[in-house]
Amino acid sequence: MNMRNKVSAIIAAGLTVTGLAVAPAHAAPVPAGLLGTWTGAVTWSDGAGPRPTTLTVTRAKPLRAEIAVIGTCTGTWTETGRSANTLSVRYAHVRGASCLSTNTWRLTFPSATRITGVTNDFGAPGSISLTKVA
């Protein structure tokens, strides 16, 4: 199994990698205070490294948000599913280059002020980590 397939398997299983150890991802309940601005970074498997990202949540339930990968592209997130501690959102490309036209993210909430997520659409694993700023 090559490295891309290993990362894909980890993401599909909902696990996180810490150093060389693999541990189950912890997910707190979906926080009530989703509205506002979140900042952090998104990383894809293309090796370009983390890209600064801003998420502006304009509606909490169902989630609607605008996401900007600084210097790369912007788009919208629309909720497609929800459980007690995860959200599924669909990204739709609005403008810019170097982003897929659509993809799906599975979001978890390590705390009320943090969002983490993974995608594996089209065989291109990605992750996002955001912290609430306003």
Image: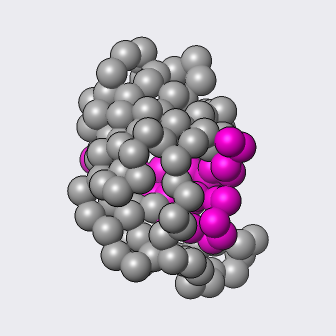
Q: Which residues are magenta?
A: 108-134
**As drawn, 43 above or below 125:** above
Residue 119 visible, this orientation? no
Q: Is residue 30 left or right of residue 79?
A: right
Q: Is residue 4 found left or right of 61 in the rendered image? A: right
Q: Is 94 situated left or right of 110 in this image?
A: left
Colouring rule applied to residues: one colour
Percent position (x, y) of residue 116? 56, 59
Q: Position of residue 79 (x, y in %)?
A: 30, 53
Q: Observer-nearest residue: 108 or 126?
A: 108
> Which of the two residues, 122 or 93, is positioned nearer the viewer here?
93
Q: Quadrant of the N terminus?
A: bottom left
Seen from the viewer's position, the closer of residues 74 and 125 is 74
In percent of width and height, residue 91 lies at 33, 40
| Secondary structure mostly taken by the magenta-highlighted segment of the chain | strand
Foreground pick, 82 / 34: 34
Q: Residue at x 71, y 43 (%)?
A: 133
Image quarter where the C terminus lies is top right
Tell me the residue at 32%/68% (across/down).
Answer: 82
Residue 56 falls within the magenta-colored stretch: no
Picture quadrant where residue 40 is located: top right
Residue drawn at 47 percent across, 34 percent down: 67
> Residue 19 at x, y = what percent?
75, 71
